[in-house]
Amino acid sequence: MSGKDEGRLNIVLIPSGDRETRSFSTSYRALRAFGLVVALAAMGVSLIIFTWWPLAVRSARASELEQELVRMGRDLERVEDLVQQLGQMEAQYLQLRDMFGSGDAGVGAPRGLFPPLAEPSPDAQSGGGAVRGSPPSFWPLSERGFVTQGLHSGAAEGHPGLDIAVPSGSYIWSAGDGVVVEVGEDAVYGRFVVIDHGSEVRTLYGHTSETFVERGEEVHARQVVALSGSTGRSSAPHLHFEVIVEGKPVDPLGFVEQPG
């Protein structure tokens, strides 16, 4: 306002009693400047709060993650201890298996962490425990399974045995008394076991996930020799079972019968 006094705001304070009355006077320009300062300060505080809040949330989340990592570390230690205990239990089991070599198993027996101990054949029970070869006559699995392919020959590539679909980890039994002549692994059969039953009769168990016998070991009928799997040339868990007579594959169903 040129030539005139700028408008001012007068504030009068009248206290109670005999106290002196006080008055304050300020220009509207100063009042506006003060209001602007207050608004800027409020905006600054708001900006700080909005900037700090996500950082505070992330910091709290980081603290929770650190606590979770600590808990996971403790859980991992417990798992490692459990694995060590299971390893000790398995070693003790194998010692018992080597010492006694006998147990109880039957078709439909449940799968577990360890295979059941071997079941001696009637010949072995009556003959003092010595294994004598016997023709394969027992179904080679603890489960019935489902035969997906039988013995056949073709112009290009034949199939020399039975493919029996079963869950991975099913018990594979020796189909008769005999001696393990080969335990190995190749591109076709995966991990496999071959047992000689005497009289030029052998059985082969292929695509196993794990084997429990060694070459030269004597085995009884229905003794667990391996677990089913899908190693080698295989698209799903199953057992490839062969019966070989005088070096040639024959139909295994001529020797063993699938459980009903």
Image (spheres, helix red, strand yellow):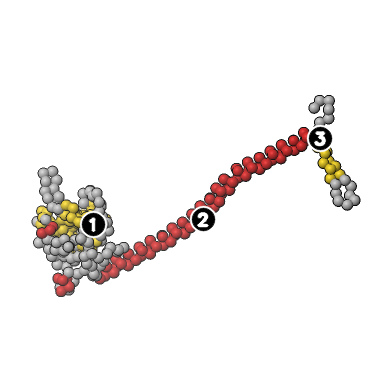
* Image x and y of residue 113, in percent: 31, 63
Query: Which residue is at the front of the view, 218 or 149?
Result: 149
Query: Which residue is at the front of the view, 139 or 22?
Result: 22
Question: If you read the primary sequence from the N terminus, does the residue marked by circle 1 or circle 3 appear first?
Answer: 3
Which residue type carries mark 3? Answer: Arg
Left/right placement of residue 168 relative to residue 253 reads right
Tell me, yes or no, if residue 192 can be seen here.
no
Return the residue at label 2: 67
Name the quadrant containing residue 242.
bottom left
Question: If you read the primary sequence from the N terminus, does the residue marked by circle 1 or circle 2 appear first?
Answer: 2
Return the residue at label 3: 8
Residue at image coords 22%, 48%: 233
Task: State the separation of the CA atoms marked 1 and 2.
Answer: 43 Å
Query: Which residue is at the front of the view, 29 or 235?
Result: 29
Q: Do the residues labelled 1 and 3 touch (CB within 8 Å)?
A: no
Which residue type carries mark 1? Answer: Val
Q: Do the residues labelled 2 and 3 touch (CB within 8 Å)?
A: no
Name the quadrant containing residue 93.
bottom left
Q: Nearer the viewer, mark 1 or mark 2?
A: 1
Return the residue at label 1: 166
Residue at image coords 81%, 31%: 6
Where is the N terminus found, in terms of image quarters?
A: top right
Above or below residue 10? Residue 125 is below
Q: Could you say whether the residue bearing mark 1 is in a helix, strand or loop?
A: loop
Left/right placement of residue 171 relative to residue 42 reads left
Q: Nearer the viewer, mark 1 or mark 3?
A: 3
